Image: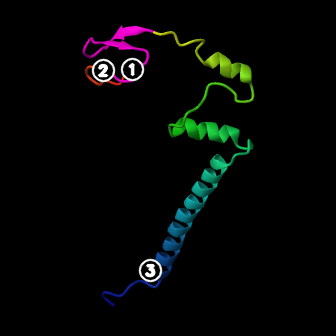
């Protein structure tokens, strides 16, 4: 009798494996369903899309796309030309420079 497995041992292993595989399968199916809902172009899941964009670093816009007045209010009135010193090296940089002409620091 030494070294024999108990009678219920095999059944418990199969039940445990079945439960673990079922849980993993349910999680994968749930993730696929959420990705399909957020990738859908319809407006049925607008709130869910906003949550996922906020959680995973998507660009959440502060205005409602259905209201054009909000879009114009969020944009700057006019980009006036300017010339300022680079914060890293002190060289003059204008509004047209994305990178500092002297040290290459990204300015925007």
The residue lying toward the viewer, choosing from 45 and 42, is: 42
Query: Is 14 positioned to the left or the right of 26 in the image?
Result: left
Dots 2 and 3: beta carbons under 8 Å? no
Circle 2 or circle 3, nearest the eye: 2
Marks 2 and 1, Cα distance to the nearest angstrom? 7 Å
Q: Position of residue 32 (x, y in %)?
A: 60, 57
Tell me if residue 59 comes above or below residue 23 in the rendering.
Answer: above
Residue 66 badge: none
Residue in the image at 43% along x and 15% along y: 95
Characterize the local packing of mark 3: few (<14), some (14-19) or many (20 or more) Cα atoms within 10 angstroms.
few
Query: Is 91 positioned to the left or the right of 38 in the image?
Result: left
The overriding secondary structure of the stretch rendered in magenta is: loop
Q: Position of residue 40 (x, y in %)?
A: 68, 49
The residue lying toward the viewer, choosing from 23 and 3, is: 23
The residue lying toward the viewer, choosing from 49 and 87, is: 87
Q: Earlier in the sequence, mark 3 or mark 1?
A: 3
Give the residue number, with chain letter if any, for mark 2: 101
Residue 9 badge: 3
The residue lying toward the viewer, choosing from 76 and 17, is: 76
Residue 97 badge: 1
Circle 3 or circle 1, nearest the eye: 1
Residue in the image at 49% along x and 73% along y: 17
Tell me if residue 6 comes above or below residue 104 in the rendering.
Answer: below
Dots 2 and 1: beta carbons under 8 Å? yes
The span shown in magenta is 82-99
Q: Position of residue 69 (x, y in %)?
A: 72, 19
Q: Earlier in the sequence, mark 2 or mark 3?
A: 3
């Amino acid at each position: 009798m030494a070294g024999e497995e108990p009678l219920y041992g095999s059944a418990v292993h199969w039940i445990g494996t079945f439960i673990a595989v079922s849980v993993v399968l349910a999680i994968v199916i749930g993730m696929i369903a959420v990705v399909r809902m957020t990738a859908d172009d319809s407006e049925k899941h607008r709130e869910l899309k906003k949550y996922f964009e906020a959680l995973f670093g998507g660009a959440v816009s502060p205005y409602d796309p259905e209201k054009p007045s909000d879009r114009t209010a969020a944009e700057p009135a006019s980009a006036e030309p300017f010339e300022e010193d680079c914060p890293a090296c002190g060289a003059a940089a204008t509004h047209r420079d994305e990178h500092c002409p002297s040290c290459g620091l990204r300015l925007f």
